[in-house]
Amino acid sequence: MLYLILFGAPGSGKGTQSDLLVNKYQLTHLSTGDLLRKEIASGSNLGKEIDQYISKGNLIPDQLMIDILSKTMDTYSESKGFILDGFPRTVQQAEALDTMLETRENANAILVNLEVEKQELINRLLKRGETSGRSDDNLETIQKRLEVYESKTKPVNEHYKAKQQHAHIDGMGTVEQIFERIEKAIQHII
Ligand code: ATP
Ligand code: MG
């Protein structure tokens, strides 16, 4: 089973490219951001707790995120494979995923790193903020999210580079151009 980790800074296009990949390869798209926003929208106490982190641009605690993700993955036991969008976002989450995959047969993980210039990320997120209604798509929170990405998330790249389960993608250009680059990078394992 393929575990395709779509990785990149906030606004790097993970959600957009996930939709294209899902259509073409029938993988199950798991976006941790979407899962968390659904929990917030439900009005639950857990959702209220999660909202405190997200609206400030912080990550939610690792163990909470790992529990939510592994529970969700278990509900898709029939799946051909997964696109993980937004997970792992810390080295601790990457290590937890390693452990989860050890117990699954034929688990094949690859991290696809979408690299986008910082100013372009900010432009895309501000533009999205005009219509997304997301509490974290404003300049102050965007800057915080980019800092968190640099300090906590970027090291996840090295984790997968060291395991040689890594592809680097130029994430600047049109949606179609970037999709073609991803396809080229994954065609040997998909
Ligand atoms: P993109 O625009 O590329 O889809 P994003 O960073 O804008 O990425 P989401 O992936 O939707 O947006 O995440 C939104 C927020 O949800 C994060 O800022 C964080 O607070 C929380 N979150 C999502 N995934 C995780 C995770 N794996 N661990 C901890 N917190 C997470
Ligand atoms: Mg997203």
Image: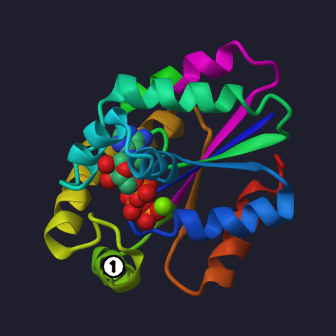
Q: Residue at x 74, y 62 (%)?
A: 21
Q: Position of residue 18 (x, y in %)?
A: 65, 62
Q: Image height check: is 148 above or below 158?
A: below
Residue lying at the far front in this picture: please name it: 43
Magenta segment: does it hold 3? Answer: no
Amino acid type at mark 1: Gly
| Closest to the observer, 108 or 85 | 85
Residue 135 is at least partly visible in this image:
yes
Residue 89 visible in the shown view: no
Q: Nearer the viewer, residue 142 or 119?
A: 142
What count of labels does the image hold?
1
x, y percentage for residue 95?
47, 23
Depicted 54 relative to depicted 120: above or below: above
Cβ of mark 1 under 8 A from ligand 1 = no
**Residue 166 spot, x, y in % from top left:** 59, 46
The residue indicated by pointer 1 is 129
The residue that appears at 46% across and 27% down in the rendered structure is 66
Q: Is residue 99 above or below residue 163?
A: above
Q: Quadrant of residue 137?
A: bottom left
Name the residue at 38% across, 45% down. 43
Location of residue 1 in the rendering, given as x and y in whole percent from the top left corner:
81, 33
Residue 102 falls left or right of residue 157:
right
In terms of image quadrants, where is residue 100? top right
Q: Residue furthest top?
A: 103
Q: Please identify the residue farthest to the left as the structure is shown.
A: 140
Q: Which residues are magenta?
A: 97-113
Whether residue 104 is in magenta: the answer is yes
Colour approach in the figure: rainbow
Element class at badge 1: helix
Which residue is rendered at x = 79% and y = 50% of the image? 27
Near mark 1 (Cα within 10 A), the count class, few <14, some 14-19 or many ≥20, is some
